[in-house]
Image: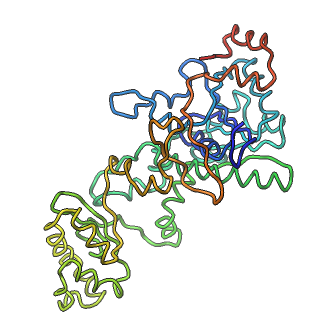
Amino acid sequence: MTDGLFAGLKVIDCASWIAGPAAATILSDFGAEVIKIEPPGAGDPWRASPAVPGKVTDYWWQLTSRNKRSLAIDLKHADGLAVLQRLIASTDVFITNFPLPVRERLKIAAADLLAINPRLVYGSISAYGEVGEEAARTGFDATAYWARTGLMDMVRATPETEPVRSMPGMGDHPTATALYAAIVTALYRREKTGRGGVAQTSLLQNGLWANGCYVQNRLFGEHVPHRPPRLETPSALANHYRCRDGRWFLMALHNEARQLGAFLKAIDAEYLVKDPRFATQLDRRANHAVLTAILDEIFAARDLSEWRPILEKAGVTFGAVCTVDEAAEDAQAIGIGALVPFADGANLTVSSPFHLDGETKVAPARAPAVGEHSEAVLRDAGYAADEIAELKALGVLQQQ
């Protein structure tokens, strides 16, 4: 039994890749007991995904499957399905992102499992939703979240630039957070009514939510053009600039009436206040390309490390365009608990993206090997030694 807010909450992660399993990871961060169901042999295909090009590692697996116990069971076998059904009777949350036809074939659809345990919260992620002509379509975050929803089309350096590929898990992790929210909402309803049910979301729906500003424009009939290239951005004060050392930063000076004077003084450009081309906000918008060129020259005269304290002192909102190396060593991220050490202290991992006052997250344990806890999970479920031995003999159960 773990400590934490969700201590005693039993969760079965019968999902693969990222979006479904990551929702279970968030529950585990707050103390839920999570059993990871995997097929015997190679286990979840996410285990073999290369975190580093040309090198198969389990770095990503450690992120998505910390705190979990692995039960390697063959759900295609009747005896394997019987094991899952026995576990479901005392389970609070079941999570899956298997395609809907696969769930039907394996007999793990919502109707199958809720018939066993009506208090079960059935957490479901799909690519395109669970109704309509595309309900059975397969998809990843790159296709359903990123490409389908207009995000891939809109995030370009210029309208002529080819579409940008997404980062691994970029849509899966926010979608997992949405599923977590749906599950917790369903648990709250269960507290009030005693009834479980389906808590579901989709990659498509989350991608539309992420691109909500532009999609909402279109829903009101507005044409949404591609964003202009950097030199044509309407405001030179909300743009990105390159410093002498080649580093970039993004500036967001939106309250021009209050901030402009201090900003220009800080960068030794007070003379621009008297320039009629930039006298008012409308003038600055009309002459944005000229102002951008002037600021380009100014910022190119110093390194980013020199500009940081200058802009901070002037109260300018900005962000350095950081590398992954810098993000992984960010003292502020460590200080707020966004990056936390594994329980063994050997490495850091990325924590779930929120905190709750008065609650301490579980120290993350290493992700399990395939079937590492198969026998222990079944013993906890009341299986006798001879029953476990029979399942192993049938090839239904794998113990690492």
Residue drawn at (23%, 82%) of the image = 264
Q: The N terminus lies in which quarter of the figure?
A: top right
Query: Is 384 or 294 nearer to us in this picture?
Result: 384
- With respect to residue 393, does 272 lie above or below? below
Is 41 displayed left or right of 60 in the figure? right
> In the rendered image, which quarter is residue 189 located in?
bottom right
State the residue at coordinates (18%, 86%): 272
Image spot of residue 163 (x, y percent)? 34, 51
Between residue 74 and residue 59, name the one nearer to us. Answer: 59
Q: Is residue 134 visible?
A: no
Q: Position of residue 67 (x, y in %)?
A: 60, 36
State the residue in front, 179 or 367: 367
Colour scheme: rainbow
Q: Nearer the viewer, residue 7 or 23?
A: 7
Q: Quadrant of residue 384?
A: top right
- Left or right position of 196 against 291: right
244 vs 237: above or below = above
